[in-house]
Amino acid sequence: MIKIKALNHLVLFVGDVERSKRFYCDNLGFIVREELGKDAVFLHAGGSDNHHDLGLIYAGENPEKLADGPRIGLYHSAWEVNSVEDLKDAKEALKHLGVLEGESEHGNSLSLYAKDPDGNEFEVFWMVPKEDWPKRKFGVNKLDWEKELSTYAKK
């Protein structure tokens, strides 16, 4: 069984990133943490210490007409675990279940991606200590398990 600490953030596919950003910032007090042009914005809730609590990603032109691809609505939920060791255990559990879709390192987190029985994508991740964020490259990077475990696993 995977040991989940908490729901950490949600990512939504939206029709207009700027419009959605204004809505969440102007009405719910979110603060822009990071923007990727017109394609995505990552928002931080004022009282949170997360890198982002809500991600908004452009779904593209006419997403409802795509046979396979983004749809307006939930992209994924992100479930946090307590340690890098818990994340490694989660990887084995997701592989055993046959639902592991991928993994990546984002600078602030190490992430696994999977789908539930209905095809809803979810992320299981471990948050890198905040003091290490400035030393890391943000984005979608290859997860180097050997390096991360040697750096963060409890000895």
Image (cartoon, rainbow, N blue to C red):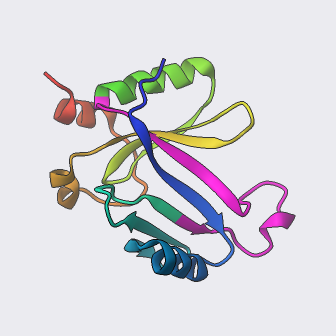
- Look at the image and say whether residue 58 sits in the magenta stretch: yes
User: How far across and how far down the image is residue 114, in percent?
Assistant: 58, 36
Quadrant where the image shows the C terminus? top left
Q: Can residue 151 be spotted in the picture?
A: yes
User: How far across and how far down the image is residue 112, in percent?
Assistant: 48, 38
User: What is the residue that sits farthest to the front in this orientation?
Assistant: 27
Residue at 35%, 25% in the rendered image: 86
User: How far across and how far down the image is residue 10, in percent?
Assistant: 52, 54
Residue at 30%, 25% in the rendered image: 85
**Position above or below: 95 against 134:** above
Residue at 33%, 66% in the rendered image: 46
**Position above or below: 109 against 94:** below
- Look at the image and say whether residue 48 sits in the magenta stretch: no
Residue at 52%, 71% in the rendered image: 40
Q: Which residues are magenta?
A: 56-84
Q: Can residue 80 be spotted in the picture?
A: no
